[in-house]
Image: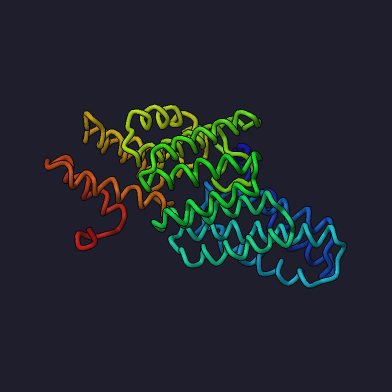
């Protein structure tokens, strides 16, 4: 979870990208440990800022840094610097893959993913290879290619073993893909694996960043498990898991997590054994308000899916009004329904 920023501190000091540019000038086009240290700080800063600022703000600068890092790769350097530089290049390409998914640019996401995995392989970085496989799975999931999403997640587990990335691969990759494919037992087993591995490690409290290269927090595992159970029609589990996650995500700066958890709750409320369309609409409106000016593909998809379900399942003024609100919020007219 990103550290809190002091009120009024914006603009008093420079961003890592500005400092990085100055260190680049001081290095005479050579690769030094100081330069690599600052690139590491740059990547960490992007991860920390991502859920507050999003790809529309950050992607252009990450692209600039990635292109510049590429210009350094052929240079002569110490072997340790070479592997480290390749890993940083892989992290930048991996982040751009994730950002491309959030922007709905799936072809770019796939291309960045291929590049990131190749760089991680060159760097002999198994942890990064498993992270990239998780991001490739994420891309296929939101493009509706659930078997491909599952295959990438399973392959990633080869590199992750029982390390931190195994948690993400199991719950975000395998469980959600299995659930979309209607494979209930396999989805449950993947969720169980995620919690089992998590219990052997030391997750940070709060809500981990969605693009963190580290371990998923328990709240992020719970919210992903809720999404899997939702696809299986297990609304009671969704209400339990998402309900527990709401308090944690609301204390985090992640408006996307706040929105996604609420959208799962709203869908469970509308689709359960005792459907309550009014309460579902109220919860969904909270989600839409949370990310009004920072929509990403996952939120747009889930909001659209909820509106489609409400329109098909309910025939009353409350449902009709809510569906109209959703498509106005999405910027889509009746002709796109």
Residue drawn at x 28%, y 45% as measured from the top left: 306
- Residue 94 placement (x, y as % from top left): 60, 58
Q: Quadrant of residue 265?
A: top left
Q: Nearer the viewer, residue 19 or 80?
A: 80
Which residue of the protein is positioned furthest toward the left in this rendering?
316
Relative image position of residue 8 (x, y in whole percent)? 60, 42
Question: Residue at the spot x=20%, y=63% of the render?
Answer: 335
Q: Is residue 234 above or below residue 150?
A: above
Residue located at (47% from left, 57% from top): 148
Q: Position of residue 324 (x, y in %)?
A: 21, 50
Check the image and name the residue furthest to the right: 78
Q: Residue at x 44, y 53 (%)?
A: 141
For residue 191, side relative to residue 84 (left or right): left
Name the side, left or right, on which 249 lies relative to 274. right
The colour mode here is rainbow
Taking depth in this image into account, of 128 and 197 the one nearest to the observer is: 197
Q: Position of residue 33 (x, y in %)?
A: 84, 56
Q: Quadrant of residue 297?
A: bottom left
Point out the image quarter for the N terminus: top right
């Amino acid at each position: 979870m990103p550290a809190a920023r002091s009120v009024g501190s914006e603009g008093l000091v420079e961003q890592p990208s500005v400092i990085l540019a100055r260190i680049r000038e001081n290095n005479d086009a050579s690769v030094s440990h100081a330069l690599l240290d600052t690139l590491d700080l740059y990547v960490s800063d992007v991860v920390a800022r991502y859920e507050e600022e999003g790809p529309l703000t950050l992607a252009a600068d990450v692209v600039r840094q990635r292109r510049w890092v590429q210009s350094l790769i052929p240079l002569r350097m110490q072997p340790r610097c070479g592997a480290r530089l390749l890993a940083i290049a892989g992290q930048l390409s991996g982040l751009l893959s994730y950002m491309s998914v959030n922007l709905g640019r799936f072809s770019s996401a796939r291309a960045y993913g291929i590049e990131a995995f190749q760089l991680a392989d060159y760097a002999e970085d198994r942890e990064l290879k498993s992270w990239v496989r998780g991001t490739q799975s994420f891309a296929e999931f939101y493009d509706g290619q659930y078997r491909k999403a599952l295959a990438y997640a399973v392959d990633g587990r080869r590199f992750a073993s029982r390390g931190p990335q195994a948690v993400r691969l199991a719950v975000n990759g395998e469980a959600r893909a299995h659930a979309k494919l209607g494979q209930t037992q396999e989805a449950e087993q993947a969720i169980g694996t995620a919690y089992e591995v998590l219990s052997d490690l030391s997750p940070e409290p709060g809500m981990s960043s969605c693009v963190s290269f580290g371990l998923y927090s328990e709240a992020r595992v719970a919210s992903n498990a809720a999404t899997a159970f939702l696809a299986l029609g297990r609304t009671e589990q969704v209400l339990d898991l998402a309900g527990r996650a709401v308090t944690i995500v609301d204390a985090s700066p992640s408006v996307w997590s706040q929105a996604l958890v609420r959208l799962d709750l709203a869908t469970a409320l509308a689709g359960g054994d005792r459907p309550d369309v009014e309460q579902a609409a109220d919860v969904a409106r909270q989600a839409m308000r949370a990310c009004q000016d920072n929509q990403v593909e996952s939120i747009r998809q889930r909001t659209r899916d909820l509106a489609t379900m409400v329109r098909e399942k309910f025939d009353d003024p409350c449902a009709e009004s809510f569906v109209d609100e959703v498509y106005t919020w999405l910027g889509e007219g009746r002709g796109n329904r």
